[in-house]
Image (cartoon, grey):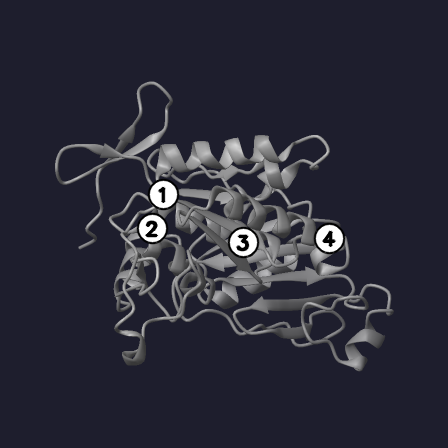
Amino acid sequence: MVLRQEAHGDQQGGHVGVRTGTGGVRMPTAIAVTSPELVLPSPDRHTPTAAVLQSAVQSPKTYSLDEALTEMHALIEYHGYVIVLCPASAPDSVRHRLHAIRSVLESDRIALVRSELPPLGLSVLALQLRQLSICDFSPGVLACAARLLSHYIYAGALLGSVAKLDRVPVTLRSHAKSWVPGAQFAVLATPRPELVKVSGGGDALLRGPGFSTKLLYATGQLAPDWVLGELAPAWNVQGSADVPLPGESARWWATGKLVEFAAAIPDISVLYQLVSSVRREDCHWCGLELIGDRCAFCAAPMNTAAESAVRALPRGAT
């Protein structure tokens, strides 16, 4: 059984709070994103939305560093901790500004999590973290869970051309076939890159997940017929839903002729069990809990016997 804490609305702001074991209410760890297009609708009234960082959306010329610091400080004050999901494909200026904000605030309560997921896949990851934020996971475990959950998101696209695609290995033969009128390719970016030709008698199967998933798809300049008629049944998905195409998708996939898709675990109880099954450690540097081999907040590697004498900072110190 999932040990899920009770969530309820904040009467003044409409925010979701989490009832603690002592009868008080705490706000869940904030999940922040760098674009409003990375915010999928909440599946229920308990799941909080994501914070869209204006410091990443707006130009530094129109959104000053002072405003960016105020924005982040307000999130920390309200939520306690902030997990920022930043696509690896984001411009250097965005990443530099996020690091500058954390540096100036001198806070150990901001986790900057870079992800190689395609735009729709990253939206799904943000949604899963939002769902788990109202459970009894500590901020450190929740931030580290981003890497774990990424391995269970099958993110790809149906493309009309792979001639300029550089996110996934493409053979010279596939490049040549891209110039054939009507050619279509199914590409899987994560968890393992794969490319197959699905038009002209090509192999239409991508290796799918071996667990129950829900399929989200976003239509660009191609029809979703193959995704719904071939891919969804082959992957045995438990439902599908159409969502708006992220504006970054065409650049990420190097073509506007696409249908982006992502299959992932939709059930919060399964997500909870998945994260709970991983051994937890205390970070030897900042004191937060972590899963995996590295702390998502301070980036320190997992403690080893040689480092056991290093004293951790007080947990939650800023």
Give x and y (percent) for residue 29: 36, 43
User: Disc 4 on helix, strand or loop?
Assistant: helix
Q: Please say whether residue 91 is visible from this viewpoint.
A: no
User: Disc 2 on helix, strand or loop?
Assistant: helix
Q: Are marks 1 and 3 in contact (CB under 8 Å)?
A: no
Sequence-wise, which precedes: disc 2 or disc 4? 2
Give the crowd class for mark 1: few <14, some 14-19, many >=20 residues within 10 Å: many
Give x and y (percent) for residue 270: 30, 58
Q: Residue drawn at (64%, 46%), measured in percent from left and top?
A: 246
Which quarter of the rendering shows the N terminus? bottom left
Sequence-wise, which precedes: disc 4 or disc 3? 3
Task: Using the image, determine if residue 30 lies above or below residue 248.
Answer: above
Between 185 and 165, the one lying in front of the other is: 165
User: Disc 1 on helix, strand or loop?
Assistant: loop
CA distance for labels 3 and 2: 19 Å
Between 23 and 48, the one lying in front of the other is: 23
Q: Which residue is mark 1?
A: 29
Q: Are marks 1 and 2 in contact (CB under 8 Å)?
A: yes
Picture disc at residue 122 = 3
Q: Which residue is mark 2?
A: 139
Q: Amino acid at mark 4?
A: Ala
